[in-house]
Amino acid sequence: MSRHRSPSRLRLATYRTARPYFITFCVFRRVPALADPHVAGVLRSAILYYRNLGWYSLPAYCIMPDHVHLLVIPRTIERHVSCIVGSIKNRVRRDLAGSGKSITWQWGYFDRILRESEAISAVAHYVVMNPQRAGLVRDYRDWTFGGVVDFWN
């Protein structure tokens, strides 16, 4: 029987409130499956699909070869953080099924609730700069699988 250690969550937090959450989830064993442009494109479509359904605002996102960063603000209490992450992972797995490609996600995800004193812009900057810091592009604006989607106040 496999045991998964759950990433720690704040005991009194509901993860449903309309505040910014910085989320990271990974490919199992950090295999660079997302380096495949088709797979990364399917993931990008899933992220934008749920955003376009109105589940969350998406100040920034970045799909790296072996992990994903999202900065989201849930729009309804029904779409809490675990629902958002689980739905994205499942949609990608389902959409890849007919293509001959597959992905295995690491169990769970990591999140950080931004404090009111934290600037969303600083976290969004961190997210979109990931490919440049990793040496994947010279300028973060050249990275196809990330960026700012919804602007914030």
Image: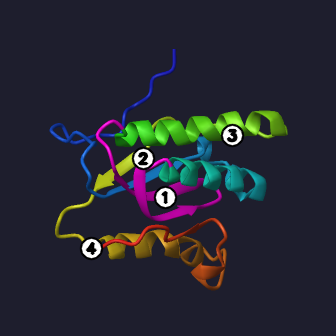
Of labels 2 and 3, earlier in sequence is: 2
Looking at the picture, tell me which residue is in the foreground, 109 or 14. Answer: 14
Characterize the magenta stretch by its predominant secondary structure: strand
Residue matched to label 1: 69
Amino acid beneath label 2? Trp
| Residue 50 seen from this side | yes
Residue matched to label 3: 103
Amino acid beneath label 1? His
Is 85 a magenta residue? Answer: no
Give the number of the disc on residue 35: none
Tell me the quadrant of the picture where the C terminus can be found. Answer: bottom left
| Pair 2/3: label in front | 2
Callout 2 environment at 10 Å: few (<14), some (14 to 19), or many (20+)? many
Of labels 3 and 1, earlier in sequence is: 1
| Residue that appears at 60% across and 41% down | 28
Give the number of the disc on residue 119: 4
Q: Is residue 85 left or right of residue 131?
A: left
Disc 3 + disc 1, Cβ < 8 Å:
no
Residue matched to label 2: 55
Secondary structure of the residue carrying tag 4 is: loop
Amino acid beneath label 3? Ile
Secondary structure of the residue carrying tag 3 is: loop
Magenta-colored span: 53-78
Q: What's the CA distance linking mark 2 and mark 4?
A: 22 Å
The image quarter in which residue 57 lies: bottom left
Secondary structure of the residue carrying tag 2 is: loop
